[in-house]
């Protein structure tokens, strides 16, 4: 019984760490721009297909090491270009946040249909990042799960370092706290918006690469990921990075225990119920501001 509970906890921590990587990117965009990116789930799918093309279709050498080295600049360029080409022109209008949300919703539909047109409707499988298991006494750990967890934590630590120790990160924090004041002191707000969008695209795309090893590459997965990222962001507090981190870990554990005791079909009900209860008693979320 204890071993089974430990397996559930490990599964919750694994999913929660990847959810945190993805949800923090969404919280970052909302915290800086006050606009919600509805194409976020489609960038998750983009990461999975990018890995599939390199590993399976092209059969590149170097495995996932090469995939991550190529994915980071690719996703950054995609995010930066889309923000500059599609969203940046909208900021000249007073109600640009609402128009940006409508535009990203249309972008999500465009990308999802494009995935089906190019890759077909069938699921794609990715090879394991590593194979085998690690046995420690009565406990058996999947090497793949441990590596995914380590990579997720590494991504979160890199993000924290970027945010707190670089000029870009400090500029992002300044714009999030006071956009007008940041612009007065010479911080290029438009570039910060584009950089923020690009960084968040990297985070969710890497999450797509990590989780697609376990859940397959699905051209219709974006809606589920978008809903989950939104739930985590709202649960933690809109725009709160620390709140999104805690919320992702809580929801990851909740999914694991509900799936184990009640069945996978009840997971979404449990997650949405937790969100509704939280918003009923604390509308600003766990760590959001009133």
Image (spheres, helix red, strand yellow):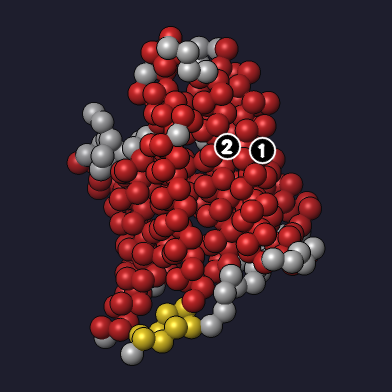
- At a point 48% along the width and 17% down the height, the residue shown is 187
Find out whether the residues at labels 2 and 1 contact each other: C-beta distance under 8 Å: yes
- At a point 41% along the width and 37% down the height, the residue shown is 165
Tell me the element at label 2: helix
247 to 143, vertically: above or below: above
Q: Which of marks 2 and 1 is nearer the N terminus?
A: 1
Tell me the element at label 1: helix
Q: Is 227 on the left or on the right of 281, as rendered?
A: right
Residue 123: quarter of image: bottom right
Query: Looking at this view, is 128 or 279 the one in front?
Result: 128
* Residue holding disc 2: 198
Q: Is 123 on the left or on the right of 14, as rendered?
A: right
x, y percent for residue 212: 58, 63
Q: Name, please, the residue furthest toward the left.
A: 281
* Residue holding disc 1: 77
198 to 227, vertically: above or below: above
Q: Is 146 on the left or on the right of 52, as rendered?
A: left
The 10 Å Cα crowd at callout 2, few under 14, some 14 to 19, many 20 or more, is: many
- At a point 24% along the width and 29% down the height, the residue shown is 290
x, y percent for residue 5: 29, 78
The 10 Å Cα crowd at callout 1, few under 14, some 14 to 19, many 20 or more, is: some
Residue 161: quarter of image: top left
Residue 102 appears in the picture as rendered = no
């Amino acid at each position: 019984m204890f071993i089974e509970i430990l397996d559930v906890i490990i599964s919750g921590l694994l999913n929660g760490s990847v959810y945190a990587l993805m949800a923090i990117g969404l919280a970052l965009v909302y915290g800086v721009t006050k606009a919600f990116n509805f194409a976020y789930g489609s960038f998750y799918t983009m990461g999975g297909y990018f890995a599939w093309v390199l590993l399976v279709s092209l059969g590149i050498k170097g495995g996932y090491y090469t995939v991550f080295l190529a994915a980071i600049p690719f996703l950054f360029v995609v995010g930066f270009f889309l923000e500059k080409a599609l969203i940046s022109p909208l900021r000249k209008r007073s109600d640009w946040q609402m128009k940006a949300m409508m535009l990203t919703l249309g972008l999500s539909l465009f990308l999802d249909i494009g995935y089906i047109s190019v890759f077909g409707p069938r699921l794609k499988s990715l090879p394991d990042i590593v194979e085998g298991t690690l046995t420690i006494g009565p406990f058996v750990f999947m090497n793949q799960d441990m590596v995914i967890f380590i990579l997720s934590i590494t991504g979160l630590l890199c993000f924290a370092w970027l945010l707190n120790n670089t000029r870009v990160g400090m500029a992002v924090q300044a714009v999030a706290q006071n956009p007008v004041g940041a612009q007065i002191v010479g911080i290029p707000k438009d570039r910060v918006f584009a950089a923020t969008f690009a960084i968040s695209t990297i985070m969710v795309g890497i999450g797509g690469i990590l989780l697609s090893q376990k859940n397959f590459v699905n051209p219709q997965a974006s809606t589920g990921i978008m809903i989950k990222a939104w739930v985590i962001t709202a649960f933690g507090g809109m725009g709160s990075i620390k709140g999104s981190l805690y919320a992702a870990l809580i929801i990851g554990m909740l999914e694991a225990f509900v799936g184990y005791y009640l069945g996978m079909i009840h997971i979404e009900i449990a997650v949405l119920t937790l969100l509704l209860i939280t918003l009923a008693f604390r509308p600003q979320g766990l760590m959001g501001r009133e």
